[in-house]
Amino acid sequence: MKIVVGQGSCGIAAGAQKVYNALENAGVQNVAELGVTGCIGMCWLEPIVDIYENGKLLHRLCKVQPDDAKNIVEAVKTGDFEAVKQLCITEDDASFLEQQTRIALRHCGIIDPNDIDGYIGADGYQAIEKVLKTMTPEQVIEEIKVSGLAGRGGAGFPTWFKWNAARQEKSEPKYLICNADEGDPGAFMDRAVIESDPHNLIEGMLIGAYAIGAAEAIVYVRAEYPLAIERLTAAIKQAEERGYLGENILGTGFSLKMRIKAGAGAFVCGEETALIESLEGNRGMPRLKPPFPAQAGYWLQPSNINNVETFANVPWILLNGGAAFAKMGTETSKGTKVFALTGKIKRGGLVEIPMGKTLRDVIFGIGGGIKDDKAFKAVQMGGPSGGCIPADLLDTVIDYKALAATGAIMGSGGMVVMDESTCMVSMAKFFLDFTAKESCGKCVHCRIGTKRMLEILTRITEGNGKPGDIELLEELCYAIKDGALCGLGQTAPNPVLTTIKYFKDEYEAHIHDKTCPAKECTDLLQYTIDKDKCVGCTMCAKKCPVGAIHGEVKHPHEIDSEICIKCGQCYKVCRFGAVNVR
């Protein structure tokens, strides 16, 4: 028997390390082997403890607490799991994984990320051995071309084309760079892959380096991902010790050294030329293109940059063939895509599906629908660079072309779900606030334009919107898209354009009626008490933090609008529906 505790960042934050320690203290070592794994993707169920027998999953226990340790040990010892039955995953929750097709995430939450033997036992490093001993670099690139693998970092550019462009360059040395600078709010795909399956990333990069002729590989990862850096550092050392990194790998004459660069958390460094500038020790600001990185990248040498998820697919493709990968997905978007499903969703976590599934399949199928069974309103795709897709487009197919037609983008895979209580004007302001702060300042359109847009959105949400503001926002959006130098500025207007396109009535209500239909913008809210419903229980007055509610016991109360800070406490505690918000 083996007991495995999920210890990705989400699991540890939920208390997985305490559960692990409690199992040790309960004497688990006397009845079973105790191990760790990364994130299985079921973030809403953490901490998760899996019980295996002869390599087969026997029980998956969810939301485990340290107090459950003794019962778990006893159950394993006796074979009677009745005492922990309430912890066992339900069939409904188990369907979260059953509805997925996992390639990039195939090992996540299953193997021990700290153990190279666990990876090797799951067919790890077989692809690089096949590549180095039986294939030429050109054959590798052709296999990637057959697969149809496109860059999973957001742009969706054909991976084989970038590899081939770097391969064709004659200058030496060449560099392979992994972009793990995952900056989208609500996105955590790259972090989970590195924390849970670091050797898969290393193997994918080994294959990429062989294909383009690089002798040095660099992983540019966010410094805010300490666990990912720790596990990747250990994995690189293990790979070196086993001969998968370093000189004369597997006796084939191919050599590759790999290192990690911790980035400072600038969103713009997700743009490949800004990332290169940061790697060189400069401020992260995009370069003009051409020349492209394949021609003059890191230290002006031929360089190739792909993100974590792109590399994570490569070993599977080389082992199973490009045609097998291309069978999944749509005509224009091949394979699978990983999403971070977050927001007002019942089952939030990591999702990997074949391209061609619909938003409805993910949100209401895999995700289980909206929290508290509220009405679905929109989903933000692609983070700050993406757009909001409304409820009437819920059956949109998930591929690059279909999503672009809505005004959103695939992006790196952030999928933020919103319900009826979300104000779309406020949501647009949130993302504009982010992109305005993250602008590197190199070009005027992005540096100044995003600030002007943010000022207008702020005015609107504060009740100071003016006629013509919507038209002015649209004018600024198109000017910024046309004039910005890099992808950050060119896509920053997307949240505004899509919310205006699909939720223009909310903008008009804010501007003309000075109301927020979602009742989220506090400056536009007014709290009143219905005297016919108020029984004078005084609960609202007791909860009011500023003493804005007055009245005698068993008599109707009143709210002083001059004092009210619109915190909503009175609305939450009233059991009689007497507090109105408009």
Image (spheres, grey):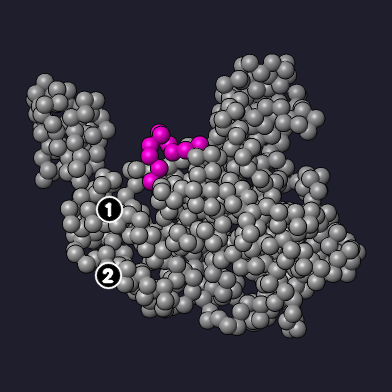
Marked residue nearer the N-terminal end (1 or 2): 2
Type of amino acid under label 1: Glu
Task: Please report the bounds of the magenta region as a residue range.
Answer: 368-377
Q: Is residue 309 left or right of residue 416?
A: right
Percent from the top left, x then y, of residue 1?
77, 27
Q: Between 6 and 133, which is closer to the camera in this rendering?
A: 133
- Give the residue pinned by disc 2: 472
Q: Position of residue 414 (x, y in %)?
A: 51, 53
Toward which corner of the image does residue 469 lie, by quadrant?
bottom left
C-alpha gap between disc 1 and disc 2? 16 Å
Q: Quick check: is 375 in the magenta stretch? A: yes
**Does 261 lie within the magenta span?**
no
Q: Closer to the camera, 502 or 418? A: 502
The amino acid marked with disc number 2 is Leu
**Relative depth, front residue between 416 and 14:** 416
Q: Residue at x 81, y 68 (%)?
A: 139
From what the image shows, is residue 581 above or below residue 273? above
Q: Is residue 500 left or right of residue 494?
A: left
